[in-house]
Amino acid sequence: MDDILQNMPNLDKVLREVHRTLAPSGVLFATFPFAIDSEEHRIKATRNVDGSINYLMSQEERQDRTDGQPAVVFQIPGWNILRECNDIGFIRAEFVFLCSPTRGMLASHISGVMILKAEKSA
């Protein structure tokens, strides 16, 4: 998964569905904006029952959808995403840190890219 988890209004539901559909011994690799200095997710917006969006913080909208519409940033995941993956049933969840200035693998606030790796049991 590449930079979409922050755009999901119900992150827990998405992770549960990934776990359910992942093959035995499968591995989820995901990149996303990461709140490296926060245990909890930074909740920026929620979806109301009627489908409207309740903005809780200044909104970042990404223009990377294929229909040209902005993608709402609902949360920036924090370290607790590892616990959530374990609670869902992944046997191991960790962050892999990649850094390679020669290959352009840098971020603006840290010197590399954090990748979520979550493994499903056999």
Image (cartoon, grey):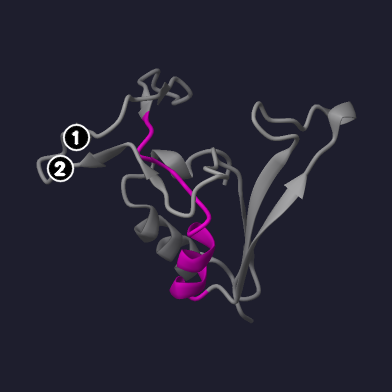
Query: Is residue 103 one of those drawn in magenta?
Result: no
Residues drawn in magenta? 72-89
Query: Is residue 73 one of those drawn in magenta?
Result: yes
Task: Tell me which amino acid carries mark 1.
Answer: Asn
Instruction: Name the foreground residue: 23 vs 121.
Output: 121
Q: Is residue 81 left or right of residue 92?
A: left
Q: Is residue 58 left or right of residue 20?
A: left
Which residue matches tag 1? 54
Is there CB contact under 8 Å for labels 1 and 2? yes
Res 77 label: none
Residue 122 lies, in percent from the top left, at: 64, 81
What is the distance, in whole Å, between disc 1 and disc 2 at their CAs?
7 Å
Residue at 41% across, 65% down: 16
Q: Nearer the viewer, mark 1 or mark 2?
A: 1
Residue at 78% across, 44% down: 98
Q: Quadrant of residue 29?
A: bottom right
Q: Is residue 56 left or right of residue 119?
A: left
Residue 56 lies, in percent from the top left, at: 25, 34
Element class at badge 2: loop
